[in-house]
Image: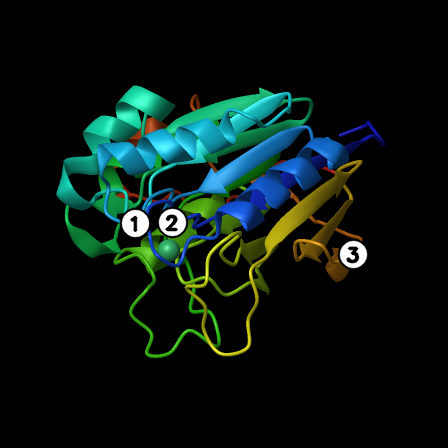
Amino acid sequence: MPSQDVIRIAHISDLHCGSRYHIPSLATRVIDELNELGPEIVVVTGDLTDMGFRQEFKQAHRLLERLECQERMVLLGNHDARNVGDEHFAEYFGARSKELLHGCVRLVGIDSSEPDLDSGRVGRNRYRWIEERFSEPDEFKVLAMHHHLVPVPGTGRERNIVFDAGDMLRVLAGCGTDVVLCGHKHVPNVWRLEDMLIVNAGTACSHRLRGRVRPCYNIIEVIGGSRVRVLLKEPYVDPEVVADFHEVHRRYCKWRPDSEPDTMEETGYEPARSSAKETAS
Ligand SMILES: [Fe+2]
């Protein structure tokens, strides 16, 4: 990854339009701040609405269409999947799973929701698709989804990780994922697991809060592929650097489309081999 350019990903989540806890003035403020910052990519990790109703999606769409950014990815959350809200989501925001490539950053967004359930899963039928998307060793790989991939402190009783979190972690670590972006329980957090950063966003503009957490969002700076900074941003407040990793090791991509796919299908996982491709970070 030769470029030393900075690619900024604004990560907002859990707008909850239509809820009595949604704060319209704060939502407008967040959009204004993002337009002033001018990130290359904006990711919204779900819960655009509170009950999945059409008028709530309409409100969320009106808000998000004001974003002035080069790339935008909007994903579905468990609240959006209520009341067959996925039909409205498709109308306003397109596919439930999607990807984009911006410079060296490949962003893959997946729908981790299930109809009318608060719990989530990725599903093993999508592992191969994710591995294929992340098969280029020189790209900076970011996966986004609504539910938690690992437990997050300060969220109460743990019941928020996707059902297949263990398998999903293996898939993502195996294909050299750099960053995972999640939303869901409105508590910001950063874990480093293997060589991945797992970044959670709070709620950007609602009072659906836990403990002393305040409405907030994240800015992720990808700096030349060897450094990642995560900044926590509360509306009206200066951003705070909450994580700064200088060496993101992406030494291998364990699975390639042309490398013995039968093995992959038999085992579901191809173990590291001495011939695995190594990439300098
Ligand atoms: Fe939420």
Mark 3 beta carbon near ligand 1 (under 8 Å): no
Mark 2 beta carbon near ligand 1 (under 8 Å): yes
Camera-nearest residue between 37 and 207: 207
Q: Residues within 10 Å of mark 3 (few under 14, many from 20)?
A: few
Q: Amino acid at mark 3?
A: Asp
Residue 16 is labelled as 2
Q: Position of residue 151 (x, y in %)?
A: 42, 69
Which quadrant of the structure image shows residue 224? top right
Where 35 sits versus 124, above or below? above
Q: Is residue 80 left or right of residue 234?
A: left
Q: Residue at x 76, y 55 (%)?
A: 239
Q: Position of residue 167 (x, y in %)?
A: 33, 53
Q: Residues within 10 Å of mark 2 (few under 14, many from 20)?
A: many
From the image, which quarter does the N terminus lie in? top right
**SS class, disc 3:** loop
Q: Amino acid at mark 2?
A: His
Earlier residue among tags 1 and 2: 2
Contact between marks 1 and 2 (CB within 8 A): the answer is yes
Contact between marks 1 and 3 (CB within 8 A): the answer is no
Q: Position of residue 69 (x, y in %)?
A: 64, 24
Residue 238 is labelled as 3
**Circle 1 residue:** 50
